[in-house]
Image (cartoon, grey):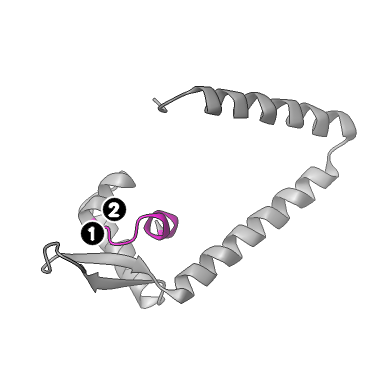
Amino acid sequence: MLGTLREEPGLGVSELAEMEQMSRPAMSAHVKRLMTLGYVQREIAKGDVDRRRIGLTVTRTGTQYLRNVNERRADWLADRLAELGSEDRTALDRAAKSLRLILESSAEPV
């Protein structure tokens, strides 16, 4: 959810629930927890849009949390890859290249 809000700041709870395929009450509960942690804040829409609309944005604390999570994931993956033998790493490299070709050749994911 934080990643989605970082990429698309200003989403409302309903929009975020739909994107994350969750019920609105469940999303509201998650958003409240994220707000309590200081990762998300509500903001009144800016510009010439409906000023009654309140959107969600990721705070600096939330951005730092995302950065830390991404670093831990990258470190974990690097450690697992280092444990593999040369043949397995080569096989993964080939598979990654094939997946990249698939992603580059498809206009829209299904």
Amino acid identity at mark 1: Gly
Image quarter of the N terminus = bottom left
Does residue 101 show up magenta in the picture?
Answer: no
**Left or right for 10, reference 79:** left
Q: Position of residue 31 (x, y in %)?
A: 31, 65
Question: Quarter of the image holding residue 95?
Answer: top right
Question: How many other residues sit within 10 Å of disc 1, few (<14), some (14-19) or many (≥20)?
Answer: some
Which residue is tagged 2?
16
Image quadrant where residue 26 sits: bottom left
Residue positioned 61% across, 29% down in the render = 100
Residue 4 forms part of the magenta stretch: yes
Residue occupying image coordinates x 39% and y 25%: 110
Residue numbers of the magenta segment: 2-13
Mark 2 falls on what kind of element?
helix
Give how far across and how far down residue 25 sits, in percent. 21, 57
Residue 53 coordinates in the image, percent (x, y): 15, 65
- Amino acid type, callout 2: Leu
Residue 53 left/right relative to 77:
left
